[in-house]
Structures are given as structure tokens and as C-alpha cells.
Amino acid sequence: MGCCESTFLRRPDSLHKTNHHHHLYNNNTNTNTNRLTQTNNGPSSPSIAGKDSLAGGAAGFPDFSEFSLAELKAATNNFSSDFIVSECGEKAPNVVYKGRLQNVNNRRRIAIKKFTRLAWPDPKQFADEARGVGKLRHKRVANLIGYCCDGDERLLVAEYMPNDTLAKHLFHWENQTIEWAMRLRVALYIAEALDYCSSEGRPLYHDLNAYRVLFDENGDPRLSCFGLMKNSRDGKSYSTNLAYTPPEYLRNGRVTPESVIFSFGTVLLDLLSGKHIPPSHALDMIRGKNILLLMDSHLEGHFSSEEATVVFDLASQCLQYEPRERPNTKDLVTTLAPLQNKPDVPSYVMLGIPKHEEGPPTPQQPLSPMGDACSRMDLTAIHQILVMTHYKDDEGTNELSFQEWTQQMRDMLEARKRGDVAFRDKEFKTAVDCYSQFIDVGTMVSPTVYARRSLCYLLCDQPDAALRDAMQAQCVYPDWSTAFYMQAVALAKLDMQKDAADMLNEAAALEEKRQRGGRGS
């Protein structure tokens, strides 16, 4: 590769890049603020959650598809009982499975609702109903992304929500109960979901309850799309305990838009009390305005009485016996929106769950151990590989004369040696300091040191600095796949998934080229 001048060690804007990704780098070191804008391909695609708009629409959402039964069997290990996520398990009338698509270009996680045999005898009727629900796209809904009609099998496929149900967080929590501000957010987000569905001509929601409220990868509450479709063609299946059903349903067996509002009122009761209280039991407290008796004791008084009173009053309106006396979905949103008091706090923080970090999509080329570790965002595995690789990839990056072996050189190599010991022992902050001493002298350049310091920064939750080092490693050694892999991980940490996927593909291509006789590792 030849000698690499120390000018590479100066400023990031001195990086000379030739491939189409190199314009990503911004001279401002705060890459998280500047988001490494793509000037050739436009901004990165919006997330599935549709960050910037409450309105539905195809942009940023998964397409609606018809799946084969073979695809869904492969996704669920032949509908293994280990993949069941229904709260009632195998005894539920319609079982829900989790799974992952096996397509090389699409490894999306999915939820699959498997109907009982012949619940929908007419496949066309089932498909038409599924396509109708599949037109809805909203960030407050766990969207329907497909269906399957195969023989007697009738299945719905939706976005998978990995962080359990409202029922689990409210009634069966282990570590912490849901704080008040998060309960208000749940109420608003579900009201927004219902209002969107109503505005799109889908006002009926079957069996709305705390089990139908799901939490996505960011901890945001979403309404399950499965309730938008009847459990059977005649709609007679209503699986919730009858104590929670709207009174008019008990009279005529029909769900109306006003019935959905009644069910929303029961969810508000759940949020207030932390318990699943039948509306009839709550009526005395509602009539007596005894809000303190209703409130969840696990909140330990950490709530606003004024806000709780507003929610209490809204619940009582929703639970009116006469359907015409209940509010509509826009009234729900209008009442709940002003109560939001922690708009800047992410939902995962309030729920007390880890921040979701999705690795870049797996490239089509077979991956090496390093590529596999990076695609899985497995920093521990990356660390083990870099320790084992040591400095074999630095051969030829420096040509030093005898005269350059000065005391300064010996000190620099000693700093690198201390950094290597700290890196091996997982003392990453110490390793950063030692490697920085080596780099700042500038007599030698080492792509391995940059890669190691990049990983240290990732493990210290500094993805901006990690990206800079990974790019410097590429500058020193332009065809080194490890430099691209480290950039992929840093970009994924910065939530730039498209760019991360591109980097992962380039790294895999470099490895394939090397196997055919090129140099790169």
C-alpha cells in the first residue's frame, strides 16, 4: 500500500475520498446535529414510524403484500408454540405469532394473526377486508402489512411491536409501573390512532382494551391493527369478558363507532387505576367523583390532580349508557392533547426500557465474522475480532528510516502499547487516551489504532467520534473493509440506517474482492 503521509492526521476536511459515500462527511464535527446529509441521494428515508407527520401515507411505511403460507411457516418455524405472543397463548380464539421474514432482502420482524379454521370461509371476502385495513398507514398504528389465504388458512401479517402490551406494563409489571406522564401519552396516542382510522372510513374497532395497545421499538404506544378487522365474517366474536363490553353490544350484538368510544373509556379507567376494573364497578366512584379512590396506589401520589380529574371526567363521558351522549374521536384528542407534560422525554425512557438500536440490513454477500458482528451491532464480538487481528492489517502503511527511531518514536509506541493493554482489558476510556497520544504525535499512522479507538468511542456512547475515526482509518487504508464496517456501525448508532446499509454492502464487497485475489480485510 505504500507510505501514508501524516497529513491524513490533520483535519477531517483534508480527507480525500473517491467513492460516492465520501460526501457524507461534514466539516462541522457535530455530525449528530448535521446528520451527515446526503447530497446525491436526498435525505435518508423516514423511519417506519413516520416521524414527521401524523398523517397516513405510503412514504416510510412498509408495503402491503400477499404472503404465501410457506413464507409465514418459515418465519415462525412452522408456527412453533415458542413463537406465540398472544396473551392467552394457544387457548386464544385467534393466535398471534411473532416471526421474521427469511427473504435475503427483507428480514423484517412481523406479527401474524392466525384465525381459527373457517372463521372466514370465503377467501375473497377475507382478502378484501384485509386490503381495506391494509390501506391505513399511521405512526400510531401497528400497521397491517399483508395477509395470506391458502386453503382453509386465513392469516394477517402486521408490524411487530417488541415491547409488550399496555396490559403487561400496567397489570403485570416487574421493575416499575408506568409513570403518570406516560399514561397520558398512551391515552393521547391511542385517541389519535382512533381518530385517524375514523377519518379514513374505518371507525369500527373490535374489542378495544389494554391488550390491543402495543409498544414499538422506541417504546411509543401503538394501536394493534388486528382489532380493525372482525374476528369472523359475521363479527359475532367478542373475546373480552362481557363485563367490559358496551351495553348496546349486549342488546344487539353489533359494534358501532360509539361502542369504540365506550371501550376507550375502559382503557382510560385502566390507565387511572392500574387495574382492569369493570365499568359497572367504577360507576359508583364516577358518580361520587371519588377520584382518589380510583387512582393507582403505585403512582404514590406522583400525578397532577387537575390532569387526573380531566381524564376521570373524560372516562365518565365515554362510559355513558346512551351512545349519543359519548364524545367522538376528535373530542378525545382535543381533551388529551393539552395534558401532555413531558413532550421531549422519549417513551423508552419513561417506560424504563433500553433504547432500541437496529443494525443495518444484512447485505446480499455472505458475511465474514466481522461483517456478521457489525450487522448484529454486537460490539463485544467486534472487540474480540479486533483483539485477535492485532496489527496484521497495518503492514506496509509506514516506512520509517533508522534515523526516525527517536525517543519520541519510542514514547509513541509505548503509548500505543499501553492502549493495546487497556483495549484488551476492556478499559476503553484509558485506551482512548493512550491511542490519542499515539495519534497526536503524527509520526506514524495506523488504521488499526483508528479502528480500535472507533470501537472504544462506540462503547463509550460517542458515535460521532467513532465515525470520524472509522473514516480516518479508511483514509489511511482506502480498501480496508474493517474501516467500512466500523463506519456502518457508527452510522447505525446515529440512526442513519440507509447509509449504514450502504457501508455494510461496500465492506462485504471488498471482502469478496479480496477473496478473489485483491487486498482488503
Image (cartoon, helix red, strand yellow):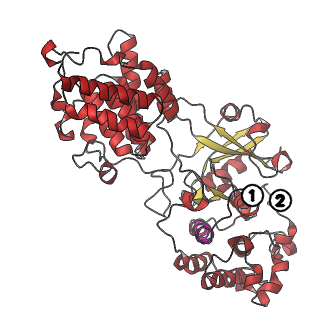
Marks 1 and 2: in contact by CB < 8 Å? yes
User: Callout 1: helix, strand or loop?
Assistant: loop
Q: Is residue 306 left or right of residue 3?
A: right
Q: Is residue 79 visible?
A: yes
Residue drawn at x 49%, y 26% as measured from the top left = 384
Residue at image point 36% right, 34% down: 453
State the residue in front, 152 or 31: 31
Residue marked by disc 2: 237
**Which of the labelled discs sits on residue 8, or is there none?**
none
Q: In the current view of this chain or complex, which residue is farthest to the bottom?
A: 288
| Residue occupying the far left of the picture | 403
- Residue 505, quarter of picture: top left
Percent position of residue 235, x then y = 79, 60
Question: Mark 1 or mark 2, which is nearer the start of the sequence?
Answer: 1
The alpha-carbon separation of the residues under discs 2 and 1 comes to 8 Å
Q: Please, is residue 214 above or below residue 276 in the view?
A: above
Magenta region: which residues?
Answer: 173-194
Tell me the kind of residue under disc 2: Ser
Looking at the image, which residue is at 49% across and 38% down?
359
What secondary structure characterizes most of the magenta part? helix
Q: Which residue is mark 1?
A: 230
Query: Residue sitting at 83 percent across and 43 percent down?
Result: 117
* Quadrant (top left, top right, bottom left, bottom right) of the N terminus: top left
Q: Residue furthest front?
A: 407
The x, y position of residue 54, in whole percent, is 49, 64
Closest to the observer: 492 or 190?
Answer: 492
Q: Is 183 a magenta residue?
A: yes
Front residue of this view, candidates 302 and 310: 302
Q: How many marks?
A: 2
Categorize mark 2 by other alpha carbons within 10 Å: few (<14), some (14-19), many (20+). Answer: some
Q: Secondary structure at mark 2?
A: loop
For the residue marked with disc 1, what is the amino acid? Lys
